[in-house]
Image (cartoon, rainbow, N blue to C red):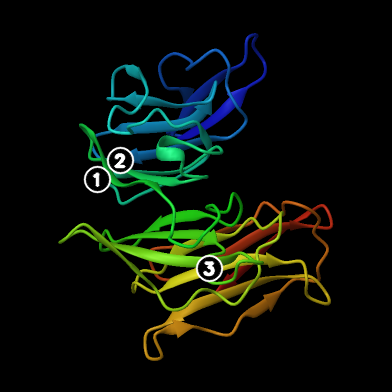
Amino acid sequence: FIAFKNGAVSPQVTTVMKYDNGNWTPVGENLGTAATSKVHLYAIADNKVVVCQVMSNKTFVGLWDGASWSTGGIDALTGDPRPFEIRMAGDGGNAYMFSINRGKGPDNVNYGHNVMKFDGTAWSALRQNYLRDGATQTSIVGFDIAVAPDGTVYLMTGDNAEDSEKYHHRVEKYNAADGSWSQVGSTIDYVLTSRCFSKIAVAPDGTPFVAYPNESGDPKSIEVIYFDAATKQWSAPVSLGDGGFAGDPNLSLTFDSKGKGYVTWVENSKLVVFPFE
């Protein structure tokens, strides 16, 4: 499945399509009437599809049940926060939405963030309107969400709780048994910039990896790190590329079922694909 803003019609809408037997076909009717360019989709069991996007300062959700779409918001997301941006991930049976509120939201929390779970029937909150103690806000760059093969949810955010002058990546994982979050290693020794479009992914063996564009290096590079289970800390970064990217490099990080990783980005107007094992 793919979801995208369809600019071929007016007003613009979100279109979802499915690839089957060599052909792309539309999935039901188009969604919405004021689509944003940032549309997120995850397909779960029983041919269900979840689409999330920011629309008119609201979290807009489309749910495909295999036959038709239902649309609306997320009732479990209380306080009517205005979303700044959304990320999605899943584990086959569940879809997860990670959103950052725009400005001061419920309870006057500045850029708090939310993690919501859809189990195929209903939404529930894993975290709502959260801001780490001592932080000015949740960073609006360098954030992502991933799910390990065993269903563990990993969340990557940025904050200045430990360094008031600078923002750093922080990775946490969700403990489903007691509903708590625990930090993975120390904060990552990299200062977020205004154009830090980072990614997190979890290998089939459960090892989390993070990729980010290091614009302060000489030369610039894409850097990849992983969590070392022996030391319980993040590894030294491996630098990739020749620094020919500008702004958002459209960075992507993923693994196949056999454990082979892939980092992709745009550099010097060309797509770079870097496989690793």
Instruction: Give the residue type that dot 2 points to.
Output: Ile
Where disc 2 sits, the SS reads strand
Looking at the rendered image, the disc whose residue lies closer to the viewer, 1 or 3, is 3
| Numbered circle sitting on residue 140 | none
- Above or below residue 237? Residue 59 is above
Q: Which mark is residue 44?
A: 2
Q: Residue at x 41, y 57 (%)?
A: 146
Name the residue rendered at 32%, 32% in the picture.
Answer: 78
- Dot 1 or dot 3: first in sequence order is 1
Q: Are marks 2 and 1 in contact (CB under 8 Å)?
A: yes
Which residue is under mark 1? 93
User: Residue farthest to the top?
Assistant: 10
Question: How many circles with numbers are drawn on the protein?
Answer: 3
Name the image quarter holding the N terminus.
Answer: top left
Q: Is residue 79 above or below residue 152?
A: above
Of callouts 2 and 3, the N-terminal one: 2
Amino acid type at image mark 3: Val
The answer to whether residue 93 shows anywhere in this view is yes
Q: Separation of disc 2 and disc 1 at Cα?
A: 5 Å
Q: Nearer the viewer, mark 2 or mark 3?
A: 3
- First in residue order: circle 2 vs circle 1: 2
Q: Label 1 to label 3, Cα distance in Å?
A: 24 Å
SS at mark 3 in the image: strand
Q: Residue at 62% across / 15% down in the picture?
A: 12
Q: With respect to residue 230, does 203 lie above or below? A: above
Mark 3 neighbour class, 10 Å CA radius: few under 14, some 14 to 19, many 20 or more:
many
Which quarter of the figure has residue 61?
Answer: top left
Residue 231, given in percent of the width and then of the height, sits at 41, 90
Q: Nearer the viewer, residue 156 or 35?
A: 156
Residue type at mark 1 is Gly
